[in-house]
Image: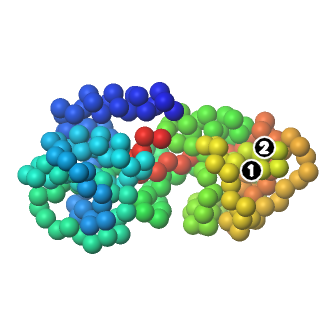
Amino acid sequence: MLHRYVRMLLTVNFLISDSTQWVSLHGEKTATYTKATCFKIPYNVFNAASCFQRCLGTLRIHYMFSYNKHQSTCLCCEDLTGIDLVSPLWTSFVPAPCKDGYVTYNYTKTQICLKYVSTSASYPEATKHCQAEGSDVIRLDSKLKYDILTDILVPIANGSKINVWIQGTKVGEEWFFNDGAQMSTDFNAICPLILSSTISEIHLRAHGSTTFSCLDMIPSVEYSFMCEHYRQFTIY
C-alpha cells in the first residue's frame, strides 16, 4: 500500500505543471456544480493538479474536486448532496469513466463499475485477475449492491443455477473482505447465507438463477466471477 501511495504522489508531482495531461489520464471535467458541502483548502492553490494533490492529502476518498483559478481556491468534495455553488469561475473534475468492458451503475454517492467474467477461475485466480485491472472481486457490503448483482446475473443465468465468486474469506469463525475489513454480523440480511461445516470451505460464492444465496466453498474450485471498481479519487 505504501508503494502505491508513493507512486500516486510521484504521478501527481510530475503532473503539477500539466493539468491538461492530468485530466486526460486520471479524470474528466464535469458540468456538475461544486457544492456548499465541499471542503475548502484553507490556503491559496495555484493550479488544478495541485488542487487534486491537496484533496488527496486531506480526504481519504472524494468524488469531485473543484478549482477556481481566479481566486486560487480549491474545494474537495466527499458529499455531493449540498447546495449548488453556481458560478462560471469554478472548474470541476470527476474520476475517469469506468474501464473498458465494465458497465456503470449509480451507487450511493458515486458510481460503481462492474464486469462479469465468464471464464472459470479459482478464488485466488479471480482475485488476482480483478486486482490486475485495478479492481477487486465484487464486494456485497449493502443490499443495493446485492440487488445490482442480481440484476446482472439473472439474464446470464437464463433460468439455470450458476455460481459466481464474491468477496469473502473465513478466518477462524469470522468472515472478512479482501481488504481485511470484517463483514457485517448481519450479512445474512444482505445475502442469505448457507454455510457448511467443512473447514476448508473458506471463500464465498453467489449461487442461484433468479435469486441468489451466498454459500461457502474451497478456494480451488473454479467459478465465474465479477470485478468491481468505483469512480472515486482515493490513494487506497
Label 2: element kind: strand
Image position of 165 with respect to 219: above or below: below
What residue is shown with label 2?
171
Q: Residue furthest left?
A: 70
Q: From the viewer's perspective, tell me whether residue 190 is left or right of residue 55.
A: right
Residues at marks 1 and 2 touching, judged by CB atoms closer than 8 Å: yes
What residue is shown with label 1?
175
Q: Position of residue 75 (x, y in %)?
A: 25, 54
> Mark 1: few, some, or many residues within 10 Å (few <14, many ≥20)?
many
Image position of 130 with respect to 155: above or below: above
Q: From the viewer's perspective, tell me whether residue 1 is left or right of residue 59.
A: right
Q: How many labels does the image show?
A: 2
- What residue is shown at x 50% (from left), y 37% (from top)? 133
Q: From the viewer's perspective, tell me whether residue 98 is left or right of residue 86.
A: right
The residues bearing labels 1 and 2 have C-alpha atoms spaced at a distance of 6 Å
Q: From the viewer's perspective, tell me whether residue 165 is left or right of residue 43.
A: right
Question: Mark 2: which amino acid?
Answer: Val
Q: Position of residue 216 (x, y in %)?
A: 80, 50
Q: Residue furthest front?
A: 42
Q: Position of residue 93 (x, y in %)?
A: 26, 51
Quarter location, residue 185: bottom right
The front one of 91 and 216 is 91
Q: Position of residue 197 (x, y in %)?
A: 91, 51
> Mark 2: few, some, or many residues within 10 Å (few <14, many ≥20)?
few
State the colouring used for the structure image: rainbow
- What residue is shown at x 77% (from left), y 46% (from top)? 170
The front one of 106 and 33 is 33
- What residue is shown at x 30% (from left), y 57% (from top)? 39
